[in-house]
Amino acid sequence: MQNFTYTGLPARVLFGTGTTSLLPAEVERLACRKALVLTTEAQAALGRYLCDLLGPISAGLFPGAAMHTPVEVTDAAVIQYRDSGADCVVSIGGGSTIGLGKAIALRTDAPQIVLPTSYAGSEMTPIIGQTDGGKKTTQTTLKVLPETVIYDVTHTLTLPPLMTVTSGMNALAHAVEALYAEEANPVLSLMAEDGIAKLTEALERVRDTPQDTGARSDALYGAWLCAVCLGSGGVALHHKLCHVLGGSFDLPHAETHTVMLPHALAYNAPAVPDVMEALRRATGSQTPAAAFFDISSAAGAPTALRDLGMPEDGIERAVEIALDKPYYNPRDVDAEGLRSVFRAAWQGARPD
Ligand code: NAD
């Protein structure tokens, strides 16, 4: 076996169906007295339900979480956090709401309990992205890693069909890149392969029967494993390209991951034969990049950058930005290679 480094991050994870009922006990376990609940406006009703569940240890609801964690929203939430006498936060929602909880923790050291309702995976990472005046910055610090994560399958039953797939692809991308990142190691590879196997298989079942709790449970379990990969592992070309497209072309996060994953993987495939073998086992397909493409296209999810609003003449600029700073990738990256990846993704071509 090759030498490797494995960094495990502290996490307390409660997984199952109906696990939300354990929330009050988890607040007490953290020795906290009052919890401020965070949601987006769209999920405010879910937040009110948690406030009722918390009863006397609820410090109220802040239903203003927004995409990209704008600092103005965090400012308002921190004021409410302090005024309400809260000493911890409970974030229920997708990556945007979890991002707000992390931003509050960064400023106040508030312990966080997170109930994820999408598959994006922020709950398992020490990464926070914030926007100030339209400029996005990302930092990595253990201060933002949630103390407790309660996965309750029930909350994922409402995830709309398209978001189920795009958010699932976002999760799969974390595990795929963990398999060939510079930080790849055998422990994380176990989680990555199983996460990809559970999630890809479950996404197809969920597409046919969105209310199937068993399929939703497998999807959420797979997404958790993929999230661990993002938190403890590394990334490469795919995440770099998504960052360029999100940051410079304002393309939507999960949809961009959905479109790019098959193409970034097809590009790297010749350089990582062992990883491709693992992906064949995990997806049950001889052509894993095409398998990911097919999951998206069968569900009617986006498969082309042009459908996300990317201008064709933006491809050259994207190539330039992506070459600006060097980063690890298992296959050498040059302008011609990147151009071919972006062009195929822009057109929505099915990779081999
Ligand atoms: P999101 O949190 O923006 O959610 C999109 C919408 O779907 C919101 O209105 C939300 O309330 C709603 N929603 C979420 N779950 C739902 C459910 N089960 N039922 C009904 N509606 C639901 O989207 P996302 O894809 O979860 O997160 C994307 C954001 O997370 C991006 O900003 C991304 O940068 C960030 N992210 C961060 C990390 C990290 O490690 N820091 C990791 C992954 C994603």
Image (spheres, rainbow, N blue to C red):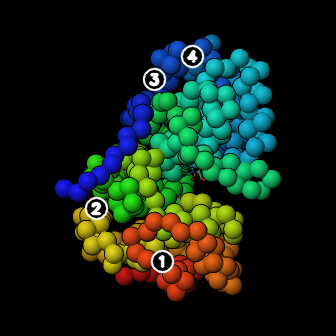
Q: Earlier in the sequence, mark 1 or mark 3?
A: 3
Q: Which residue is mark 3?
A: 22
Give the amino acid type for the residue marked by disc 1 in the picture: Val
In contact (CB < 8 Å): disc 4 and disc 2: no
| Residue hosting label 1 | 333
Report the residue marked by disc 2. 282
Q: Is residue 97 left or right of residue 220?
A: right
Q: CA distance from mark 3 to mark 4?
A: 15 Å
Which dot, 3 or 4, sits closer to the camera?
A: 4
**Three-letter code, disc 2:** Ala
Q: If you read the primary sequence from the N terminus, does the residue marked by circle 1 or circle 2 appear first?
A: 2
Q: Is residue 71 left or right of residue 280?
A: right
The outermost residue toward the left is: 1
The image quarter in which residue 9 lies:
top left
Q: Residues within 10 Å of mark 3 (few under 14, many from 20)?
A: few
Between the C-alphas of marks 1 and 4, the distance is 49 Å
Q: Tell which circle, 3 or 4, labels the residue nearer the N-terminal end.
A: 3
* Number of the label disc, if any, that sits on residue 32: 4
**In the picture shown, does residue 5 fall above or below 290?**
above
Residue 17 is situated, as x and y percent measured from the top left of the image, at: 40, 34
Sequence order check, earlier mark of 1 and 4: 4
Cα gap from disc 1 to disc 2, whole angstroms: 26 Å
Residue type at mark 4 is Cys
